[in-house]
Image: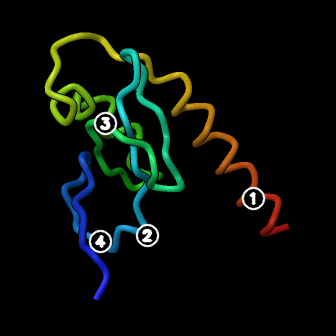
Amino acid sequence: MDPVRSCIACRGQGNWRDLLHLVLRDNRVTPDPSHRLGGRGAWLHPNCFEVAKNRRSFQRAFKTGENLDLHELENYLSNLLNSVHKEQK
């Protein structure tokens, strides 16, 4: 049986392979698709990014009141979405 994780945005539970692992590095939220980076982590459904951003789920998950840099995560999710659309064509 695979471990179950909760999405920080929708709070839905799912297989850890279906969620994107995130790590906080130097105030940047970094995607960790290999699930290998150390540090405080969080889990997110890729399609829940906007919900997490609007609800300040990243700050809550990483236990910080600071504004976090989400650019690396946004770029990763954008590239992921583009590759999925290319595969569907």
- For marks 3 and 2, give the one nearer the viewer: 3
Say which residue label 2 marks: 17
Mark sitting earlier along the chain (4/3): 4
Element under disc 1: helix
Q: Residue at x 24, y 53 (%)?
A: 10
Mark 4 and mark 2 in contact? Answer it, CB < 8 Å: no
Q: Residue at x 40, y 60 (%)?
A: 19
User: Looking at the image, is 7 positioned above or below residue 27?
Assistant: below
Say which residue label 3 marks: 39
Say which residue label 4 marks: 14
Mark sitting earlier along the chain (1/2): 2
Element under disc 3: loop
Mark 3 and mark 1 in contact? Answer it, CB < 8 Å: no
Q: Quadrant of the C terminus?
A: bottom right
Q: How far is the residue under mark 3 from the one under mark 2?
A: 19 Å
Q: Residues within 10 Å of mark 3 (few under 14, many from 20)?
A: few
Element under disc 4: strand
Q: Between 67 and 85, which is closer to the camera in this rendering?
A: 67
Say which residue label 1 marks: 85
Type of amino acid under label 3? Gly
Q: How far is the residue under mark 1 from the one under mark 4?
A: 23 Å
Mark 1 and mark 2 in contact? Answer it, CB < 8 Å: no
Q: Quadrant of the N terminus?
A: bottom left
Q: Between 60 and 51, which is closer to the camera in this rendering?
A: 60
Q: Residue at x 32, y 51 (%)?
A: 43
Type of amino acid under label 2? Arg
Mark sitting earlier along the chain (3/1): 3
Residue 37 horizontal/vertical position (percent):
43, 43
Residue 11, by quadrant, is bottom left
Type of amino acid under label 4? Gly
